[in-house]
Amino acid sequence: MTASELKLWNQLSAHRLMGLSFRRQVPIGNYIVDFACPSHRLAIEVDGASHSFDRAIEYDKARTNYLQEKGWFVIRFTNEEVFHSIDDCCTHILSSLTEKGVVFK
């Protein structure tokens, strides 16, 4: 894992985020997502600088479209977002799930 992935994993692992069960490096079709919460079909990607190049942007777009077609909701964060605003990233994950109708106990 990259340093930013490890930082986010420390927030997601062991049901630390509102009891949600996340797995890392989850295969979905021909792709492997950084993190997934299978029970809510949520995939989370952490993108480094290499994702800002045109070719990578097109690949990520195709990958996101594929995952969405398979019924997954995809959230993308940059390394910088994770490093500098980890709490905001976690809030965004929870807000996105709440918008999908997930109720937290």
Image: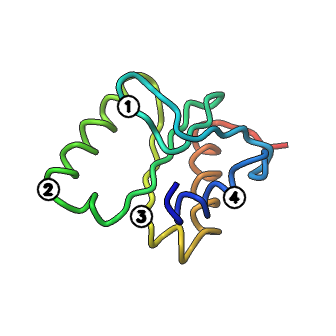
Disc 3 is placed on an element classified as strand
- The amino acid pointed to by label 4 is Asn
CA gap, disc 1 and disc 4: 23 Å
Q: Earlier in the sequence, mark 1 or mark 4?
A: 4
Task: Give the CA distance from mark 1 to mark 2.
Answer: 19 Å
SS at badge 2 = helix
Q: CA distance from mark 4 to mark 2?
A: 31 Å
Q: Position of residue 91 (x, y in %)?
A: 64, 60
Q: Which residue is mark 3?
A: 78
- Gap in angstroms between the C-alphas marked 4 and 3: 16 Å
Would you name the residue on which mark 1 appears? 31
**Type of amino acid at the residue the image marks with label 2:** Asp
Would residue 98 be found to the left or right of residue 3 on screen?
Answer: right
Residue at image x 47%, y 30%?
A: 72
Evaluate if marks 4 and 3 touch, with contact meaning CB atoms under 8 Å apart: no
- Label 2 and label 3: CA atoms lie apart by 16 Å
For marks 4 and 3 on the same chain, the one whose residue lies earlier in the sequence: 4
First in residue order: circle 2 vs circle 3: 2
User: Residue under circle 4?
Assistant: 10
Please tell me whether mark 4 or mark 2 is closer to you in this view: 4
Q: Percent position (x, y) of residue 89?
A: 57, 62
Tag of residue 54? 2
* Residue at 61% over, 43% down: 97
Which marked residue is nearer to the observer: mark 1 or mark 2?
1
